[in-house]
Amino acid sequence: MSNKNIHPSAVIEPGAKLGKDVTIEPYAIVKENVTLGDGVTIKSHAYIDGYTTIGAGTTVYPSASIGTKTQDKKFYGEKTEVIIGENCEIREFVTINSSCGENSYVKVGDDCLVMAYCHIAHNCELGKGVIMANGAMLAGHVIVEDYANIGGMTPIHQWVRVGSYAMVGGFSRITHDIPPYTLGAGSPYKLGGLNLVGLKRHGFSLDVRQELTRAFRLTYRSKMHLNDALEKLKQEYIDSTYIQHWIEFAKTSKRGLIGLERHSNDMDDVLEDLEVLLEEKR
C-alpha cells in the first residue's frame, strides 16, 4: 500500500493487487480478489468486487459497481471473472455484474466508454472502442463487436450480437442481431442503411463503403433469400475482409438478423433458436 494516491478513507482489502500510480479516492471499496493495472483511477464511492481485473489507464467514476454477483439465478457460487481493458471510462452508477458458469467471464475491451447508468450483465463481451450511451442495458450473453455505438436507454435482449461499427439509435429495442457497419433505430427497430458517417470517421475507403453498400442492398433490398444473397456476395467479393465478416456474421446468427427474422427458417436455424430459448428459461 505504498501508493501515495490512496485516500485513507478508501477500503482496500488484503489480497487486492495494485499497479503503479493507482489513484483510489475517498470511500471507494476494492475487494480482496481485485487487480488494478498501472495508472487506474477509482473515484469516490465506487465498489469493485469479485475476481475483477481493470486494465492500465482506466477510470471508474463515482458509485459505479463492478464485479458483483450475477443476477442470473443459475449461479451457484462458481468462480467467474470480470475483465476490463485499458484506457476505458466507466461512468457514474454503471453496473457490470460478474459472469455465470465456471471460469466464464464478462469482458470489456480497450478504449471503451460506458456512460452513466449503463448495465452489463453476465457473460457479455464488448470489443475495442465500444460506446454505450447513458442508460443502455445489455442482458446476458450479449456480444458487442469493435467500435459499435449503442444509443441511450436502449435495452438489448440476451444472446443478441451487435456487429462492428454499427450505430444503434437511442430508445431502441433490440431483439435480434444487428449486422456490422449498419445504422438504425426504433421500436420495432428499423435499419436505415450503412453507418456511413462512422465508417468515414474510421477511415473506410470509398471502395470498401461501396462494397458494403452492395452487401446491404443484396441482403435487405433484393428480396433474395438470405442464403442466396450471402452466396452471391461470397462469389463477388472473395478477397474482401469486410464482406467476409458480413457473411460470417449473418451465417452464424442464432437469433436471426434484425429485419430478416422470417428469413431464418431453415430447420437447423429453427432448432438452434429453440435451444437458445429453452436455455434462457432454465
Image: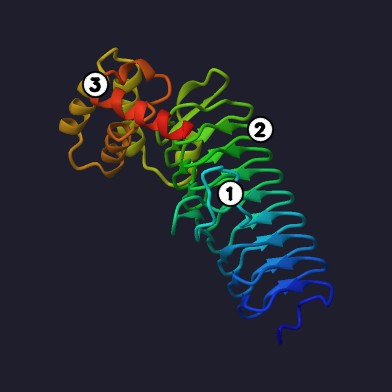
Position of residue 241 relative to residue 282, above or below, is below
Q: Residue furthest bottom?
A: 2
Q: What's the amino acid at mark 2?
A: Met
From the viewer's perspective, is 258 left or right of 67?
A: left
Q: How busy is the neighbourhood of tag 2: few (under 14 within 10 Å), some, or many (20 plus)?
A: some
Gap in angstroms between the C-alphas marked 2 and 1: 21 Å
Camera-nearest label, 2 or 3: 3
Q: Which residue is mark 2?
A: 153
Task: Give the quadrant of residue 145.
Answer: top left
Q: Tell me the SS state at disc 2.
A: loop
Q: Tell me the SS state at disc 1.
A: loop
Q: Which residue is mark 1?
A: 70
Q: What residue do we see at 83% from left, 68% from top?
A: 26
Q: Which residue is mark 3?
A: 267
The answer to whether residue 195 of the structure is visible from this angle is no
Q: Nearer the viewer, residue 50 or 255?
A: 50
Camera-nearest label, 2 or 1: 1
Residue 43: percent from left, percent from top: 76, 63
